[in-house]
Amino acid sequence: MTPLPDRFCPTDGTRVPAASLAWCCPACRGPLDLDFAPTPAPLKSLAGRVNSLWRYAECLPLAAPTVSLGEGRTPLVELKDGIQAKLDFLMPTLSFKDRGAVLLAELALRLGAERVVADSSGNAGTAVAAYCARAALPCTVYVPARTSAKKLEQIEAHGARLHLVDGDREATAGAAREAADADGVFYASHVYNPYFLHGTKTYVHELWEDLGGRLPEVIVVPVGNGTLLLGAALAVAELHAAGLIDRRPALHAVQSAAVAPLAHAWAEGADGLVGVTPLSPTSAEGIAIPRPPRARQILRAVRASGGTFLTVTEDQIRHAQRDLASRGLYVESTGVACWAAVREGALEGRTAVVPLCGAGLKTGLAAP
């Protein structure tokens, strides 16, 4: 079996051995990146491979998966005027988080973890619970007490222990991290663990393959903790370095106007979060993250791509959700944020893809 790559801290360079269960930088307690620079396979060599994200084996830090549920290879459908939607709500647990969760569960299994801990606003916890069930790993998922009932039901259905936290998303993450410091525990963090990003990057590898070896001019992604955006940036860099694309698409990051710390920092021209961002209730619970740990990396990736930040109001989210439903696509309120941001002409005629990240059955319709 191919050796696992080491991890390192992008802030201070501290290295963490591949076999360690440490979940953060031991010096600054920040997120880790992976010492891994793969070369993607050319388009013609993909024919006949397994019909899941594992077809991009050269780009994944784990090989020969044992816990796969056939995740990935979700379809593209046209919406209008050169804008396509990628239907990532058609994943095994009905959200794009399966892309990263499968790698976390596989890694936990290989590292011999005794149990797994995760924190989530719902979808990541569901995905981790499902893949831990597949791997026969005990799992505890910490979620805010206000999380959608259907997401809580799904997590428990997979056999995970559910731990409700009174407080916001940050309080939930804090409770999980405290538990993650115990011996034998694998912290399946979709924020701190870089393996998750190397799972989400397959979203862009699929776009590249399905669009015949090219990418749209703009890739639009919802951003809370930024795991899909950072994964997209990784994939774009890999494809460009290999000479498989000749230009890099702009990354447009979308936040709810109610919780938009990154959009605020962007408007201020800052390299990191600035001040205290006002927070209001939002139906886009999956991206309501007031202090994303990878904020500097997210801002840097958007800036390097020539992209920008967009925000959407609750009315825009509500109208976009119903608009997509009228087109046959029932998507959860967080998952419609990108369509809400661009459906009325924000892209000025450029080609683009928006992700529909989670199924509508997870949350129901946004309240009027």
Image: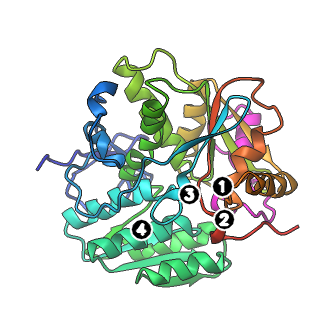
Residue 29 visible in the picture: no
Whether 18 is drawn above or below 130: the answer is above
Q: Would you identify the image quadrant in which residue 171 lies?
A: bottom right
Dominant secondary structure (helix, strand or loop) of the stretch shown in magenta: loop
Instruction: State left or right for residue 368 relative to residue 192.
Output: right
Mark 3 → mark 4, Cα distance in angstroms:
16 Å
Q: Nearer the viewer, mark 1 or mark 4?
A: 1
Q: Residue at x 30, y 25 (%)?
A: 44
Q: Nearer the viewer, mark 2 or mark 1?
A: 2
Badges 2 and 3: C-beta atoms under 8 Å apart? yes
Toward the viewer: 93 or 116?
Answer: 93
- Which amino acid, mark 1? Gly
**Between residues 332 and 79, which one lies in front from this camera angle?**
79
Crowding around mark 3 (Cα neighbors within 10 Å: few <14, some 14 to 19, many 20+) is: many
- Contact, CB < 8 Å: mark 1 with mark 3? yes
Where residue 293 sits in the image (x, y, percent)? 54, 52
Q: Earlier in the sequence, mark 2 or mark 1?
A: 1
Q: Which residues are magenta?
A: 259-288
Q: In this figure, which residue is indicated by the disc labeled 1?
A: 335
